[in-house]
């Protein structure tokens, strides 16, 4: 099918079901992308409105359609619930983690481990910090001492030459 617009005569044939199935599908696909042809289609339907069969019990039909939509939505929701609700093991639940943390705290407090840790922290805080040299400072100090040694040997060598 071309990208050209479909004429009103063709839409009238579509409304009267005078087209083959393949052409009908092409026209339907074209309606999704062409507003001008959609207007022509609506005009064709309105012009053939008197020849189309009248719908009996419109309210009942609407209720039936809405019930079907609701049923389809409920089926989808129930499938999603089944997929989402995976049974958790007891150790994957949040309450288990709270009880485990409380039990470990009570165990550590009653055994005195926390007291020993606090004593160790206190003694560590009370010891004066020792002076530490960085690696770069050590290399610089060794370099200067090496230069001092070499400079001293150089001066002694000059004294012997005189």
Image (cartoon, rainbow, N blue to C red):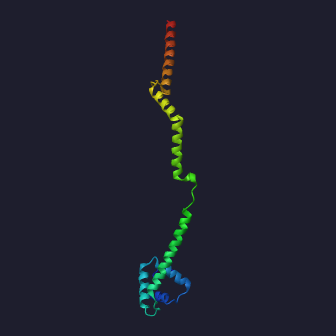
Tell me if I can see residue 3 in this picture: no
Residue lying at 53% horizontally and 70% vertically, measured from the top left: 76
Q: How many marks?
A: 0
Q: Residue furthest bottom?
A: 51
Which of 133/107 is in front? Answer: 107
What percent of the width, then of the height, locates residue 30? 48, 79
What percent of the width, then of the height, locates residue 29? 50, 78
Residue lying at 50% horizontally and 9% vertically, measured from the top left: 156
Residue lying at 53% horizontally and 65% vertically, measured from the top left: 81
Tell me if I can see residue 23 in this picture: yes
**Residue 113 position (above or below residue 48):** above
What percent of the width, then of the height, locates residue 19? 53, 88
Residue lying at 52% horizontally and 47% vertically, measured from the top left: 99
Q: Residue furthest front?
A: 110
Which of 62/115 is in front? Answer: 115
What percent of the width, then of the height, locates residue 102? 51, 44
Which of 68/143 is in front? Answer: 68
């Amino acid at each position: 099918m071309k990208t050209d617009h479909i004429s009103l005569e063709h839409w009238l044939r579509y409304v009267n079901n005078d087209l083959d199935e393949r052409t009908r599908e092409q026209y339907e696909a074209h309606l999704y992308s062409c507003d001008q042809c959609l207007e022509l289609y609506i005009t064709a339907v309105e012009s053939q409105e008197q020849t189309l069969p009248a719908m009996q019990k419109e309210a009942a039909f609407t209720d039936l359609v809405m019930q079907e939509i609701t049923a389809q939505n409920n089926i989808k929701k129930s499938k999603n619930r089944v997929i989402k609700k995976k049974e958790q093991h007891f150790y994957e639940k949040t309450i288990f983690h709270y009880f485990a943390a409380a039990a470990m705290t009570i165990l550590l407090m009653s055994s005195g481990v926390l007291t020993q840790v606090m004593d160790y922290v206190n003694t560590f805080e009370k010891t004066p910090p020792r002076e530490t040299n960085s690696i770069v400072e050590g290399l610089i100090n060794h370099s200067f001492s090496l230069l001092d040694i070499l400079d001293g040997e150089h001066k002694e060598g000059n004294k012997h030459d005189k």
